[in-house]
Amino acid sequence: MSAEVVDSNPYSRLMALKRMGIVNNYEEIRSFSVAIVGIGGVGSVAAEMLTRCGIGRLLLYDYDTVELANMNRLFFRPEQAGMTKTDAAVQTLVGINPDVDLESYTINITTVDGFKTFIESLTRDNKRKRNTGGSKSGVDLVLSCVDNYEARMVVNQACNELGQTWMESGVSEDAVSGHIQLLIPGETACFACAPPLVVASGVDERTLKREGVCAASLPTTMGIVAGLLVQNSLKYLLQFGQVSKYLGYSALKDFFPTMELRPNPQCANLACRQRQGEYEAAKPARDLAARAKADADAAEAALASKVPVHDENEWNISLVDDDEGVAPLGVVAGQQGSAGYLPEGLLRELPDAEVFDESARTEEAFVKPEGDLDDLQKQLEALNAF
Amino acid sequence: MSAEVVDSNPYSRLMALKRMGIVNNYEEIRSFSVAIVGIGGVGSVAAEMLTRCGIGRLLLYDYDTVELANMNRLFFRPEQAGMTKTDAAVQTLVGINPDVDLESYTINITTVDGFKTFIESLTRDNKRKRNTGGSKSGVDLVLSCVDNYEARMVVNQACNELGQTWMESGVSEDAVSGHIQLLIPGETACFACAPPLVVASGVDERTLKREGVCAASLPTTMGIVAGLLVQNSLKYLLQFGQVSKYLGYSALKDFFPTMELRPNPQCANLACRQRQGEYEAAKPARDLAARAKADADAAEAALASKVPVHDENEWNISLVDDDEGVAPLGVVAGQQGSAGYLPEGLLRELPDAEVFDESARTEEAFVKPEGDLDDLQKQLEALNAF
């Protein structure tokens, strides 16, 4: 994966994420495996996004075929009508980025045989997984992009059994809202911890569908939900930003609700309760690791306070003492490195610091903490570790 | 545009938006013209979404060619490297939906000749525009998907001159934030009303780019911004939901800020100040129309209160008097039409209304408004019209 900035490098704009300080380790994306269940309006776009990002390995699951009625969503093309969604997806994705290892499974995971194949495919090749950490799975993340509760419950079952982190996604029947959700077995609620009414009451959801009526869908809503899903997948895999636990999208008012769901100790799913027990049992080890990390961070911070933050300083940013003379307004280029430097053509909009009321800056305005600040910081971090 | 629910109908899932009560007039999308300036990471996906939605006519503007370095965003394919973005876009879009009238312009709108062609193409064929309402433009909406301020200022100039509503979009250099913005000449701020610092200070932004450094980009962020842009375009054109004036997206924390920007009476752009004057002058007519609409709505509401809300009542929903006996818990199917009806397999989770504390329901708890409620409603609407 080259970072070279030339027009012929498909990864230059991705590797630039490192230079911009967003991601430390972008090239690690080549080592991750992601499974996508359901290659419809959301799953197909998610697969394309991950393929273009250069993901290492993609496992695709669907049993449906492409229809012209799917053309109101991104990804599939009219000439693919009649092909299985998995075959059509592989055809398109290989053309976009041959570097990605693609595995496709034309199966219905809600059947007995389908479930068996699903579990086998997830566990096989688990040397490929970056961090096995107690999980039997061979993938780093499972994305659920299915359109019914039965399939969601099957993904939930598999991931609870394998201790596999997954993300769920969904779009409403009226096409104007959707959501994504992160599920970590034992740590967050599983899909059975707080089941939707239709699941809790055991109704066969197929009886709810009516002849001659179809759900509405829009390429916009599906594309946005796929984008939010893969964006959070990238944050999870490459460890940057903050992964949303639950993020909703309501198109009519551009409203984006968030929430967190804790696991239910009375969850009906046995595997979920087992994972909850393991998570609870591992608490002392987690606390120890958190305290060690806090200590290491504090040590690093103490060290860092003694050296300049940036060795390179391409924007010539420097701290000046308030009492030091600041260059007058309108000083322009040719003075690189001095505190008064401004690029050619730019003028200062605000007056110099000197002009502001000096009285607000008296020593008395600041309350000095008692004791040593480093000590207080360490105490705080130790408390946070619990 | 057929609403028939068959696998071979590419519009069935879009026409279902009418049945779901989201859009009144989906088929009107065939009568709209939209111009997209900049067919890059955001513009190309916006074009594909509108094409799959069945937009009537698309005008595409770009002067750049497809490079392998663009493959980390959706839409373009490696075999299109070297083609102009306009040619490659037309090739793909025609294949997806031949019903859309595509016009492509391989021009740089920031040149003198380019600007002339841009204005001519926007004003030509203005019989195609649904509602000309004083505007000289022949399109219903302009989407700006460019990657520099100079081009944004040119789109702003053209739209101010033509009185053309447009939407602006942008993605940050570090690929993890973006925004969309609605601009209605005279009514909202134009792009010159509160210009970014680099525009206000007249710096040539090309001098800010450095050799061997490129901006980062992600298919996720670009896809989300394109989705939000086209979703708001659909809401604007088909008149449903609420069009966002400004919507930001910050990927690291999934934060979506909104705001409104009023026009600046001292805006440096002459055409903007002219549109502001016209908008001000048209205020009495707007007020009159708003009052007429309020009266019509009130009359309709008065009429509606006398007839049942739904003639069809497929879910058998009915209001029951609190004093009327309600069927006991657990009553199941076979009683369609009665107030106690529940679909097979569903049980009531909450107790009957009867079980709740009766004391909270005394007449004294409700303060009866003085005078007639309809009168109050009309007074309120008349106030709101100003």
Image: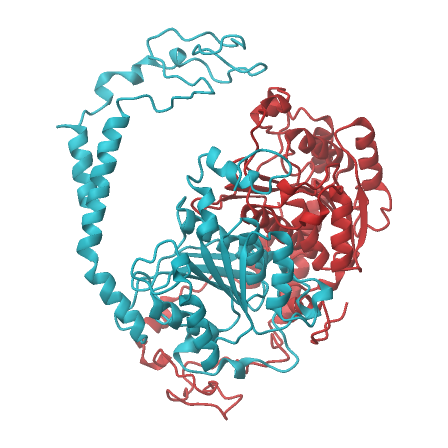
Chain colours: A red, B cyan
Image point (17%, 55%), residue name: B284
Residue ID at (64%, 21%): A204
Is B169 or B116 nearer to us in this picture?
B116
Viewer-closest of A308 and B335: B335
Compared across the picture, whether B72 is left or right of B376 comes to right
Judge whether residue B216 can be spotted in this image. no
Q: Is residue A145 left or right of residue A335?
A: right
Res. A309 image quadrant: bottom right
The residue most toward the left is: B371
The residue at the point 21 percent across, 59 percent down is: B282
Query: Quick check: A282 left or right of B348?
Result: right
Q: Quadrant of residue B217?
A: bottom right
List x then y, in percent, for residue A66: 70, 42
The residue closer to the viewer here, B158 or A303, is B158
Residue found at the far bottom of this picture: A334
Position in image of residue A291 (x %, y %): 67, 52
Q: Nearer the viewer, residue A356 or B333?
A: B333
Q: Residue A3 location in percent, x, y?
A: 72, 72
Q: Position of residue A357 (x, y in %)?
A: 30, 75
Q: Is residue A72 above or below residue A99?
A: above
| Residue at 60% across, 19% down | A201
